Amino acid sequence: MPIGKIEPLDLTSKHWPAYVRRIKQFIVLNEIRDELQVPMLITVVGEATYALMCDLCAPDHPENKSFDTLTELVTNHLEPQRSEIAERHVFRQRRQRPDESLTEYLQHLKHLAVTCNFGTRLEEDLRDQFVSGLASDVMRSRIFAEKS
């Protein structure tokens, strides 16, 4: 009996990379042999994702591809390469909404930062944008009073 459960992917969720990481952990945890990884993937992704895989593999079939090839095909389709400049622009434009908590605001900034390729400057860029985008001028002023 397998440990854990993988639900079908909701294609509208846009969480394919996280879904693939979960699949890989399921494979490790359940010690799924290499030759069973593609059948397992095809079985758990659900009807809509399998249909997408069929379209992306045509005229071949997903069953004839490797696990890595299948996940890469879907990744390239659902998560096409984005312009770093455009992604950073969206990140820099993000401001805290009046009804948004600080935690929600920070979580959304972190989500946007994923595609910005900040590298080792990630924490600094997150901090600067967090402060710049705060809805409260009073809070921002208090933070500006701090040395770092």
Image (cartoon, grey):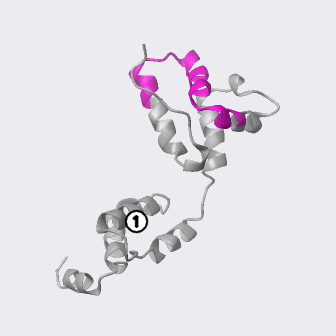
Question: Based on the displayed image, in which of its 4 quarters is residue 61 positioned?
Answer: top right
* Residue closest to the eye, 138 or 26: 138
Question: Based on the displayed image, in which of its 4 quarters is residue 130 positioned?
Answer: bottom left
Residue 66 image position (x, y, % from top left): 63, 26
Q: Which range is magenta? A: 25-51
Q: Is residue 15 left or right of residue 102?
A: right
Residue 45 included in the magenta stretch of the image: yes
What's the residue at 69%, 35% (across, down)? 53
Q: Can residue 121 be seen by looking at this rendering?
A: no
Count up the numbered dots: 1
> Looking at the image, is 49 positioned above or below residue 130?
above
Kind of residue at badge 1: Leu
Q: Main secondary structure of the magenta part?
A: helix
Residue 56 image position (x, y, % from top left): 74, 38
* Residue closest to the eye, 109 or 70: 109
Q: Is residue 24 left or right of residue 103?
A: right
Residue 140 image position (x, y, % from top left): 26, 82
Residue 100 included in the magenta stretch of the image: no
Residue with the mark numbered 1: 109
The residue positioned farthest toward the top in the image shown: 1
> Looking at the image, is 57 positioned above or below residue 86?
above
Question: Based on the displayed image, in which of its 4 quarters is residue 99 positioned?
Answer: bottom left
Q: Is residue 105 left or right of residue 44?
A: left
Q: Can residue 78 be seen by looking at this rendering?
A: yes
What's the residue at 74%, 33% (across, down)? 54
The residue positioned farthest toward the right in the image shown: 59
* Secondary structure type for disc 1: helix
